[in-house]
Image (spheres, grey):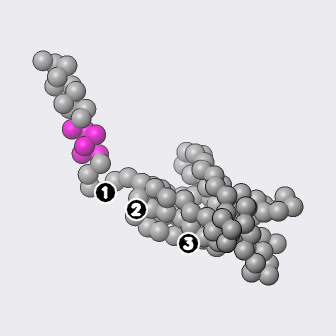
Amino acid sequence: MKRRALVGALLMAGILSGCGGGGANGSIEGTVEDSYSVALPNAHVRLSVVASEEERTTTTDGQGRFRFERLEAGDYVLIVQCGGGLVTATSATLEKGEHLRRDVECG
C-alpha cells in the first residue's frame, strides 16, 4: 500500500510539474554573417547556460541560420566559431516562453 501511494505521489508530482508552463519553451535563433553581411554556413554555434555551464551546439545551415529550442528562462552565452578560428561571443537573457533573435557578425 505504501509503495502504491509513493508511486502515485511521484506520478502526480511529474504531472503537476508539467502543468503551469514551467519548463523549457523558449528559443534563441539568429544568423551568422561576415562583416560584408554574407551568410556564413557551417559556423559552429555553442549555447552555454550561465547557471549550470550546460552547453548545446549546432552548426549554421546554408543561409547561416541557427536555432536552439526548448530553452528554460535564464542567462545564456552564445559563442560562434567562424572560419579562420575567429570566435565571437554575446550574452542573452531569456524570459519564460520568450523567443529571442541574436544575429552575429564575424569579422
Residue 21 marker: 1
Q: Which badge, 2 or 3, is on the more N-terminal residue?
A: 2
Q: Which range of residues does the magenta coloring cover? A: 12-17
Image quadrant in which the C terminus is located: bottom right
Q: Amino acid at mark 3?
A: Arg
Place of residue 88 in the rendered image (x, y in percent of width and height, measured from the top left): 75, 64
Query: What kind of element bears circle 1?
Result: helix
Residue 101: x and y in percent read: 55, 72
Dot 1 and dot 2 residues touching (CB under 8 Å): yes
| SS of the residue under disc 3 | strand
Q: Residue at x 46, y 56 (%)?
A: 70
Separation (CA) of disc 2 from disc 3: 15 Å
| Residue hosting label 3 | 101
Circle 2 or circle 3, nearest the eye: 3
Distance between the alpha carbons at the discs numbered 1 and 2 = 9 Å
Residue in view at x 66 percent, y 65 percent: 61
The residue positioned farthest toward the front in the image shown: 62
Query: Which residue is depicted at the point 26% across and 51% down?
Result: 19
If you read the primary sequence from the N terminus, does the residue marked by circle 3 or circle 1 appear first? 1
How far, Cα to Cα, is label 3 from label 1?
22 Å
Labelled disc at residue 96: 2
In the displayed structure, 16 sits above or below 83; it is above
The circle drawn on residue 51 is none
Percent x, y of residue 103: 64, 73
State whether the magenta stretch is mostly helix, strand or loop: helix
